[in-house]
Image (tube, rainbow, N blue to C red):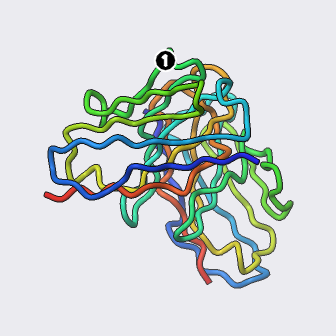
Amino acid sequence: EIVLTQSPGTLSLSPGERATLSCRASQSIPSSYLAWYQQIPGQAPRLLISGASRRATGIPDRFSGTGSGTDFTLTISRLEPEDFAVYFCHQYGSSPPWTFGQGTKVEI
Amino acid sequence: EVQVLESGGGLLQRGGSLRLSCAASGFTFSNCAMSWVRQAPGKGLEWVSTVSAGGGSTFYAVSVMGRFTISRDNSKGMVYLQMNSLTAEDTATYYCAKGTGSGSYPYQFDYWGQGTLVTVSS
């Protein structure tokens, strides 16, 4: 099973600042099959990034993903008020079980 | 417009059974692997189970294997999760999620339902 470790657990920032979230895998993820989701409290997760760097439909370009192998990063270039949420990484590149990181909370 | 809607959650006692349903529309249902992902109160996301696009392959997390059964009806656009021998550790919001994969594996989840809450009392 591939374990995903996200850091930091909580990121305290202000609107307009840059957020950098990390996701580290316990083994290399094939074909960069790594996704990022945003979850606002009380809502379902929303797909932001797939394939480590490909933005999903309708996702603003202030969200970007980079990385390969075992180290991946989600960057939010300038935080908007609606970006304060919890972010999860997810690997879907190997055979099951498919796993999620424990989440990073971005708070004001 | 893609829509995913879960139903069937509720409160039940330890050892009980429950069947969750997921109605999906707005896409070619029979071309997409479908999954259940759960989230315990205040916790992270946990993949639970996946059924392949054609329904012939199923996959389970170790934590539910032998107790949960996933199935689908492509003629109705429905996915089901039969849950037996429930324990307090199964208490969570259960999300039905559409995968982008057209075969056995779901790949990323591009559409999620709003979830249905299952509470198991001990």
Query: Does residue A47 appear to the left or right of B83 in the view shown?
Result: right
Above or below residue B117? Residue A25 is above
The residue furthest front is: B76
Query: Quick one: quadrant of the C terminus of chain B?
Result: bottom left
The residue furthest top is: B56
Residue located 34% across and 35% down the image: B82
**Pointer 1: residues within 10 angstroms few (<14), some, or many (20+)?**
some
Q: Secondary structure at mark 1?
A: loop
Identify the subunit bearing mark 1. B
**Residue B37: x and y, percent?**
47, 45
The quadrant holding residue B59 is top left
Query: Does residue B58 appear to the left or right of B23 in the view shown?
Result: left
**Residue B77: x and y, percent?**
59, 33
**Residue A105: x and y, percent?**
55, 70
Residue located 71% across and 53% down the image: A48
The quadrant holding residue B109 is top right
The quadrant holding residue A12 is bottom right
Task: Tell me the amino acid under the disc marked 1.
Answer: Ser
Above or below residue A14? Residue A31 is above
Front one among B99 and A105? B99
Residue that badge 1 annotates: B57
Residue located 43% across and 33% down the image: A1
**Residue A87: x and y, percent?**
59, 61
Residue located 57% across and 20% down the image: B104
Above or below residue B97? Residue A74 is below
- Label count reads 1
